[in-house]
Amino acid sequence: MSCPGFGEVNIPSSRAFWDDCEEDEFENVGQAEKLQLKFDGESGPDVAALQSEILVVIEGPSVTHFGSSVLLNGTTRICGIPPKTSSLHWNPASKQLLAILEDDLTSSGEVTELLLPYAKLAKKVVTITLKPKVDFKSEEIQKYSDDIAIVRGVGVNEKDIIELEAPNFIAGVAAGIASWRNQADLPVSSFAVYTDKLPLDSTAAQPVLKLLKGFVSCSPSYVPARKESSYLYM
């Protein structure tokens, strides 16, 4: 005889179990707050979207420091992008928009909607998705074992960039914006960078910087943020 509730799952045999639940428990569940761009200064949610020569979207885990270090020279921050530390920046001299997005698939649909007004007005859009190298699927994966990064394109007509092979795919805000631009028959270039090191270090950043230089002005190198010293000793 087994002990009920220990090492087994008890599934209710009738609706009576569920009928015992208080209806108030469901009524008190509030709707999730709608995400909004957090505009800086005196700007508000009604500010008109800027028309840019190019919108660059770079998305990945812990990408904020990299993006702010190498891309933001001569730019001003327009707004924060929820729910994390993502942000949108404007370079008035070159008319470039830069969206630096922390990877968050749970809210990517809402964030895509927030950025679509800017994506619609941009003459060109470039998206770059950063992923860990272990996510890359290939029958010849050993061929890339010594590479710092694997760079692939989606609908990109460039001789040095190989098309992203199935079953690999891009997701998130970058995929949402690229899909909308493609459906609207507007120019878009999408890239996926599978790298050994996330967050990026100075070496892993080089393939990303090389890619960015083809579209926008950026720093030639990247110095990662210093980590706090550990007080643990072996």
Image (cartoon, grey):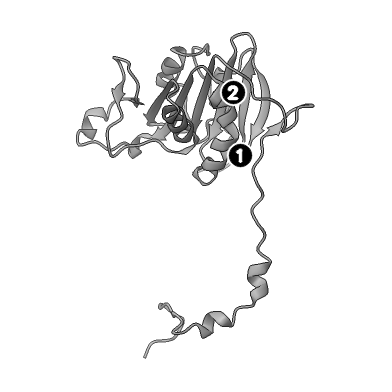
Q: Which residue occupies 58% across, 25% down?
A: 118
Question: Amino acid type of disc 1?
Answer: Lys
Q: Which residue occupies 71% across, 27% down?
A: 47
What percent of the width, then of the height, locates residue 1? Answer: 36, 91
Q: Which residue is mark 2?
A: 68
Q: Nearer the viewer, residue 72 or 12?
A: 12
**Spatial separation of the CA atoms under disc 1 and disc 2:** 15 Å
Q: Which residue occupies 72% across, 33% down?
A: 45
How many numbered discs sit on the rendered protein?
2
As drawn, the residue found furthest toward the top would be 93
Left or right position of 123 against 139: right
Left or right position of 173 against 189: right
Instruction: Name which of mark 1 and mark 2 comes first in the sequence.
Output: 2
Q: Which residue occupies 38% across, 87% down?
A: 2
What percent of the width, then of the height, locates residue 169? Answer: 35, 37
Q: Nearer the viewer, residue 146 or 124?
A: 124
Q: Which residue is mark 1?
A: 84
175 lies above or below 126: below
Disc 2 element: helix
As drawn, the residue found furthest toward the front would be 184
What percent of the width, then of the height, locates residue 181? Answer: 46, 27
Disc 1 element: loop
